[in-house]
Structure formats: C-alpha cells, structure tokens
Amino acid sequence: MKLVKTFLLSVCAIFTACQSGKNAEHKQDSIASIESGPGKIVDERFLIVPGRSVGEISLGEDVESVGKILGKPDAGDAAMGKAWGIWYSNDSTGGMRDEIAVYSSYKDTTMRIKDVKQVRITSGKFKTQDGFTTGQSEADTKLKFPGMEKLSVYLNQNNDTVTVYDAKQDGIGFEFLKGKSIGLTVHPMNQSVNATYLTLHPEWKRVE
C-alpha cells in the first residue's frame, strides 16, 4: 500500500511540475500576456509591444528575417553600416500610404550580422493590447505614457510642423502633426528614439 501511495504522490508531483513549467513557458512566450486589457485581444500580426516588437518584427532580430516576412523594401537608405528599409501598404486611402520602416545596424563589433534597432509604423491597424494606436492626441498619449518628453521639431516636405516625443523608459516614440500622432516607433527601453529621423526623412528640416 505504501508503494502505491508513494507512486501516486510521485505522479502528482511530476504532473504539477509539468503544468507549472508549461504555464510559465506560455506566459513568457505569449505576447498576449503583456499589457493585457480587459476583454481586448489584438491580432499578434498587428500587436505593438513597446520596447519589444511590432507585429511579427522584434527588436534584436536578424534583419534578413525581416525580408522574409515583408519581402523586398519599397524604399530605404543605407550608410556606415546603418540602414532604413521602408515598406508601403497597397490599400492606403486619402492619398497617404501607410508604411512600416525598420532601422537596423551591425549587432556587434564583428560586423557580420545586422539586427533590428527600431520599427516605425503609421497604420492604425497596429495597436497595443489595450487598443492604443496612431491618431491619438498629445494629451491622450501623455495619459498613456506619462513619461514621454518632447525631443525635437521638424518641418516636413510640405512645411508642416512635426513634433517628435519619446517615452524613453517605455521604448516607444511618437510623431505629432497638427496635434495628432502620425507615427509610432518602437525602440529598446531606456534608449532614445532620436538621431535617426534625418536619415529616415532627409527632406525634413530640423528647426528645434
């Protein structure tokens, strides 16, 4: 009888350990567990996780794998081991094309692999788990990311004023035009989003 009880206790212990391991693994791997909002589930293909990823593209990922996901970029710029790749949507309306831009540079001093450093999007299809996306006002964005700070001001190709803010500690930056966000950039936490805009937008003129 003792042997039976010992066997059953061992089985229960193993099962419990397996279940705990699976639950921990699931929690770690599931992006949906991050920034969870009650009753709101975002398709992971369009999920923004500040400081980590945009859709299927993650920071630190080998940039060659981005091409396998998005295909050949429609535009871009490269110099001194750093590069922007830009992909435009085919279904944009109102004369404005939505875009995904991926900034990459060498991963380390071996200069063999380039990895993703920042991902910028303009489409409202992409959003955080609790529904935050482009098109928000500066005030609403400040409520969501109270640590955001103004970094710089540019004049774009139409001489409109674009203001760049960054929630550095959260790993997400914002561009505002006429009081509404027109782009979000995910970057590593505690690293500034700035210093890349003139290469992404060489036609912009920095005024502040």
Image: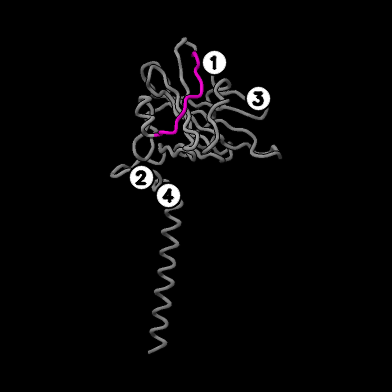
Q: Residue at x 35, y 26 (%)?
A: 139
Q: Earlier in the sequence, mark 2 or mark 1?
A: 2
Measured from the top left, where is residue 57 in percent x and y? 50, 38
In magenta, the rendered stretch is 145-156
Q: Amino acid at mark 4?
A: Ser
Q: Which residue is mark 2?
A: 36
Marks 3/1: CA–CA distance:
20 Å
Picture residue at 68% right of the left edge, 27% below the top: 80
For label 2, the crowd category at 10 Å Cα-Cα, with few meaning under 14, some 14 to 19 and many 20 or more, is some
Q: Which mark is residue 30?
A: 4
Q: Name the residue carrying label 1.
A: 206
Locate the N terminus by quadrant: bottom left
Distance Cα–Cα, label 3 vs label 4: 36 Å
The answer to whether residue 121 is seen in the rendering is: no
Q: Of the numbered discs in the image, which one, if any, rests on residue 79?
A: 3
Q: Quadrant of residue 96?
A: top left
Residue 91 vertical position relative to residue 109 in the rendered view, above or below:
above
The amino acid type, in three-letter code, at marker 2 is: Ser
Q: Is residue 153 magenta?
A: yes
